[in-house]
Amino acid sequence: MTMLTLKNYVGGEWFAATGGLETALSAITGEPVAQLGSQGVDFAAAVKYARTVGGPALRKMTFHERAAMLKALATAIIARKEELYALSAHTGATRIDGWIDIEGGSGTLSAYAARGKKELPDGVLLLDGPVEPLSKGGTFVGQHVFTSLQGVAVHINAFNFPVWGMLEKLAPTLLAGVPAIVKPASATAYVTEACFRIMLESGALPPGAVQLVTGSAGDLLDHLRTQDVVSFTGSAATAQKLQSHPVIARESVRFVAERDSLNATVLGPDAAPGTPEFDLFVKEVVREMTVKAGQKCTAIRRTFVPAAHMDAVQEAIVARLAKVKVGDPGVEGVTMGALVSERQVKDVRKAISELAQEARIVFGDPEKAPEGAPAKGFFMSPVLLRCDEPWKATVVHEREAFGPVSTLMPYQDLADAVKLCERGQGSLVMSLFTCDPAVATEVIVGAAAWHGRVLIVDRDCAKESTGHGSPLPGLVHGGPGRAGGGEELGGIRSVHHYMQRTALQGSPRMLSAIGQRWMPGAPVKDGVHPFRKTFGELALGDEVITAERTISLEDIEKFAHFTGDTFYAHMDEEAAKANPFFGGRVAHGYLILSFAAGLFVDPAPGPVLANFGLDELRFVKPAKPGDSIKVRLVAKQKKARNKEYGEVRWDALVTNQNGETVATYELLTMNAM
Amino acid sequence: MTMLTLKNYVGGEWFAATGGLETALSAITGEPVAQLGSQGVDFAAAVKYARTVGGPALRKMTFHERAAMLKALATAIIARKEELYALSAHTGATRIDGWIDIEGGSGTLSAYAARGKKELPDGVLLLDGPVEPLSKGGTFVGQHVFTSLQGVAVHINAFNFPVWGMLEKLAPTLLAGVPAIVKPASATAYVTEACFRIMLESGALPPGAVQLVTGSAGDLLDHLRTQDVVSFTGSAATAQKLQSHPVIARESVRFVAERDSLNATVLGPDAAPGTPEFDLFVKEVVREMTVKAGQKCTAIRRTFVPAAHMDAVQEAIVARLAKVKVGDPGVEGVTMGALVSERQVKDVRKAISELAQEARIVFGDPEKAPEGAPAKGFFMSPVLLRCDEPWKATVVHEREAFGPVSTLMPYQDLADAVKLCERGQGSLVMSLFTCDPAVATEVIVGAAAWHGRVLIVDRDCAKESTGHGSPLPGLVHGGPGRAGGGEELGGIRSVHHYMQRTALQGSPRMLSAIGQRWMPGAPVKDGVHPFRKTFGELALGDEVITAERTISLEDIEKFAHFTGDTFYAHMDEEAAKANPFFGGRVAHGYLILSFAAGLFVDPAPGPVLANFGLDELRFVKPAKPGDSIKVRLVAKQKKARNKEYGEVRWDALVTNQNGETVATYELLTMNAM
């Protein structure tokens, strides 16, 4: 292919570097693929453009509009995915590696689009938690809310997943209403730039929402302020350097890091040779060593097995590794591709030589080019090391060889395994292969605090398991300590990282109006039965108070015989008296609910199409024979579902003739527009 | 009083400094109150003691046991509160100032004790969010959990609230199961030390749970690692210094900071002179200037009012300030006490002289001792400044005068007010005085991201409002940017800061066993009807599948006429056909619920005492006349409430004759032990 010249996209325009270009080489052929640089980029202007153009544009959109934007981006990428696969091949990726990157990336956008639609409101302000009562009289209350940060997110990405790495950060950032400046790693920036172009050309993004810096980040960090975020993926050394930039502490810039990780896997003491978990373990270790040629921050670097099974495990892993075919992924039969660059090959070789001080190589020759692989590409055999005395070793727990490399080590008992995992001083993920819930519980209680994710594989889940190395949109990705202490993904959790949580205090009237959720104490409005109002006509606070209905003993008996619910508290005065809560016969809770519905339901066809559910029902005080109940319903919250109808959440309060609360719940109806 | 000699409590023993003592003076008399120091403290040993003794002891306790411990501490402090008030007087505090500190502090412990009991499980592992479906077949799922960090929390506190400042950090830390090393500010460490002694003597704390360093923190930070937390309150300069310590970035030590804050208040455009909000505003500004002699990180430093009302506001504030009586709080009629130290007086005077470059003093003389105040104490008049051109000013937005000082400034319109608030570059709290929800909404949407808390005062909430300056246990305390970017309090949110969130993945069987919450796909057990089992006998997964019951058209009509719920979808075939969800007459949702109860209820007295509620009911598929329903109930989660009974949450699934889901819900029962 002809060499590409990558540009930067800043201030709403493509900008060619004024000089100082570096060259990215094909991992397969060693030939130049692209040249890139950022000399001449005005970083101060880029930051200002994001803050003054991108931020305001995104903050004008509701969460649902931003979700639709993510969906449009995902669709645009999928429509042109083959362009990306073609470029991805030059990074040394197999088709499967590319699938993780490209389709995994657009899948992450889609997942956030779906969550945004389902879990977030069609507004710009996100309520966090329930109303906090702050006063006896109820005139002063609290409510936490999230609003968009008014700065820019700087995303600094790693080379290994040029598409997914960009999209997994963009999805929560854009959904939060925050513009981003994306800085990919040089070695694979040509894939990122291609994906970025596809997104721009989709027309789904408002101006200023995203910018791209293909070369060095220059003095970008100098321009960050209080409302900005840095989200970094890469080496611990670079992360420390960035985190120590004075602007971070001075301006309290949020700094999210995902860095080195000596991820461990543990073969459970119960998972002896011959068990399904043993075989699953061996397969997973090999898979993690070879997928993406081991260039994954989540790959298994430390492999812990019961001391008694060391030889059996080694033999099984080596047998599988021997079948791995390294080479040009374009060639049939090849199962593992290349490392991304010559530098990466050198780094991994150096790391292996350090590991080899404490461990011995039992499979693979790191110095020898794999047989049949193109001579000028950056290929390397998978390398398995074995360290029999992990407590005497240090490097194996601290040095990340970012390639197809893992070290096999023995443990004595489960407590020993937990402590050995800790030696990594914080990781993105650990896995455990066991069929025994007691083993799993002991490991989780002892070890979870050191790991961002823990995968437990047993025979039940193995077929559907997504594996040790796969971050998923719904689960947090990131880990404590050496792994950087950050959190990405995890569904809406990661959207919060780009928003500010604020505690609001005031009267129910004020906080209901701001949060668009009615709360007790806020104004109500009587008049037309609110069930007669369309979704659009209905206002929060619209209320109906029903007539009273007296519950007789006959009602209770009739209900009992009709439904079959002849629980003694309803039927037997003596027995009911002995019950600590009732002190005599009481009406069924479901009778109260049913009578309540009879009181508020409006029979004729109208805008209320269905009562589709009910939340947080609590029976507060029993209703005794002779008690009279009535219901107050207030429109609490509205959420459009589509163009035909929307959900309405009603606050329901059932009281008795003394004004005491009998039951409270939230009623859910589907209302026509 | 005789001068106290404070000790350090480290490694489970009181330790006297080996030299290098500093002296704290009484703010009222200027006489020495205490000497203190930490020379000779082995900080490495203290950290190790916390990690190896305190952490394991706390992690063995359940959340409920830790909550009971907090309650015992609160009770012990209240029983001996007068000892603390006596010492507190030397800090310059009035009785009200002392009340905020001492009773506010123990109240925070009590609040966390109550929340821990109510909102956390009686175990050591906290589930976070629902089960995440990760596979089509449901054999592979996710669940987020929180577990205790396995390190130590270092609490570095400010001088102004020597009791509350310690307790508001200890409450969430200890509830999370993490030991702490407390480092109070020297000037008021004698109050902290006295409270610390009371807590130790209560016997409620396990060994190693808390340690105290009264003098300098020495090389404490050098010994921190991956699982540790630093929680700092104080100046931005010190915070930046600490945050830049290499251990923070290297080990990803969590760093929570609460530092400078130029808190603003805004008089709404509607709150003209003569409105209740105007009067409330004036009163609050004066209160915030004088309570604790303005030495509160949350005090109002910037007072923004509509340009037209500048003079009226100034006049009203000055009139109230003129009534403030500064002096020894022990003397009748005194309403404002002293600053904490001579250094503080000097600092505040220096800050005022800087502010006076941009603003003019309209009340108070910072250089003159207030009339009638003890000559050797650290007294100062409240000082109001006025700056008529806030957009030309810088210092007023950036320099925190940590004393009885505020600057009055005009704004042009609401957008201008929002932008002027931003000039503080992040604050702990802002307040707004308005009666108009539209004004409040505009301010929140525009400004919330810059503030950790926003108080909106109107005539409805004023009487019960806790005021601009009061952090509350249930609301987050902390703010972005200049305020440090940290978060404290906010109920259980702050407990999370001392725990690690981990995503677990595996089979439903494994994750149910670990999290002690049954989920679909996990094993179930039939046999004795689970309603026949006591709370103790009942195991998660215990199941009952009921017989079937056919719903006839007669049932529907009978139910309709009995309950009064004659909604057309149940009664009128033609009309029901036109409904987009039903396509014909269907049974009432409440009929389904009632028949379901009739199917699973066990009539005779037994361990199930009551069905006290129901959560997340969704009607999934309508039941038509002739459909048969049955119910599957599975014990999902248990929570002991006291020694007599506990709550059981049941997974309820109603299906029809085709095995299709008709309704799902969670049933709540109270079961005898």
Image: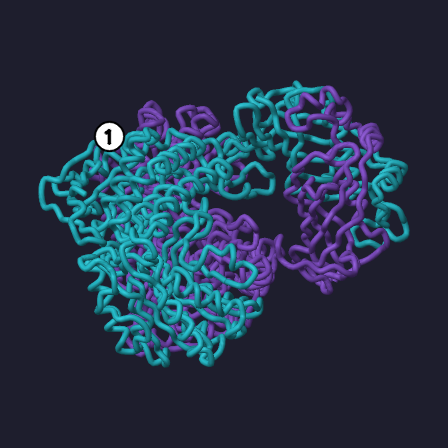
Chain colours: A purple, B cyan
Q: Secondary structure at mark 1?
A: loop
**Is residue B200 shown above or below A253?**
above
**Chain of the residue displaying label 1:** A
Q: Front-most of B336 and B231?
A: B336
Q: Front-most of A546 and A645?
A: A546
**Is residue B632 shown above or below A653?**
above
Which residue has dot 1 on it? A389
Q: Residue at x 31, y 49 (%)?
A: B231
Residue A268 figure quarter: top left
Crowdedness near tag 1: few (<14), some (14–19) or many (≥20) residues, C-alpha within 10 Å: few
Q: Position of residue A350 (x, y in %)?
A: 23, 48
Q: Front-most of B347 and B520?
A: B347
Q: Position of residue B25 (x, y in %)?
A: 18, 51
Q: Position of residue B509 (x, y in %)?
A: 54, 31
Q: Is residue B402 visible?
A: yes
Q: Residue at x 44, y 68 (%)?
A: B282
Q: Position of residue A311 (x, y in %)?
A: 33, 27
**Is residue A373 shown above or below B514?**
below
Would residue B392 be found to the left or right of residue B474 on screen?
Answer: left
Q: Residue furthest left?
A: B19
Q: Front-most of A168 and A607?
A: A607
Which kind of residue does numbered mark 1 sit on? Glu
Q: Residue at x 43, y 27 (%)?
A: A439
Would residue A184 be found to the left or right of residue B605 on screen?
Answer: left
**Is residue B269 shown above or below A149?**
below
What is the count of numbered marks? 1
Q: Is residue A27 visible?
A: no
Quick one: quadrant of the N terminus of chain A? bottom left
Would residue A212 be found to the left or right of residue B132 on screen?
Answer: left
Quick one: quadrant of the C terminus of chain A? bottom right
